[in-house]
Image: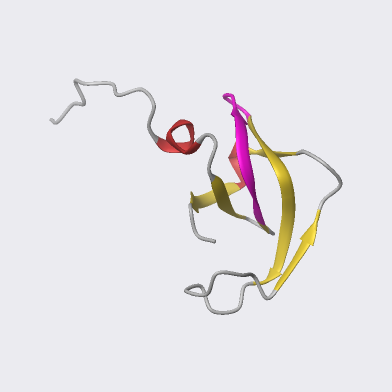
Amino acid sequence: MRKIVEEVSGEGLEKLLGETVTLFCCRYIYSGKLVGVDDKNVLLEDAGIVYETGELTTPDWLDRQALPGSWYVAIQSIESFGVLK
């Protein structure tokens, strides 16, 4: 049996605080500046929903619609995340 014996804080979403992130969720793709993380939600500033990504290697989204102000996303809906655009 293998066991994890070391816990590292500041990894995952916490490591990306202050960065502009992309959240691939079960229904939508969200992007925005990650300004808050707790055990159930993340908080994005300048948030938007990405309806068309275009080439992932280009600097801009093909169709990103801004959301009104800051936006909360449930962690349970996030499938993957990172700094993309």
When asked about the image quadrant of residue 34, the answer is top right
Can you tell which quarter of the image residue 53 is in?
bottom right
Q: Is residue 26 left or right of residue 9?
A: right
Q: Is 77 placed above or below 60 here? A: above
At x 68%, y 76%, the residue is: 62
Q: Position of residue 15 (x, y in %)?
A: 43, 34
The question of residue 50 being in magenta is answered with no
Task: Name, please, the residue furthest toward the bottom.
Answer: 55
* Magenta segment main secondary structure: strand
Please tell me which residue lies in front, 19 or 4. 19
Q: Residue at x 61, y 70 (%)?
A: 60
Magenta region: 30-40
Q: Quadrant of the C terminus?
A: bottom right
Quadrant assignment, res 69: top right
Residue sticking out furthest to the right: 68
Residue 32 lies in the magenta-colored region:
yes
Position above or below: 69 against 36: below
Judged left or right of residue 31, residue 14 is left
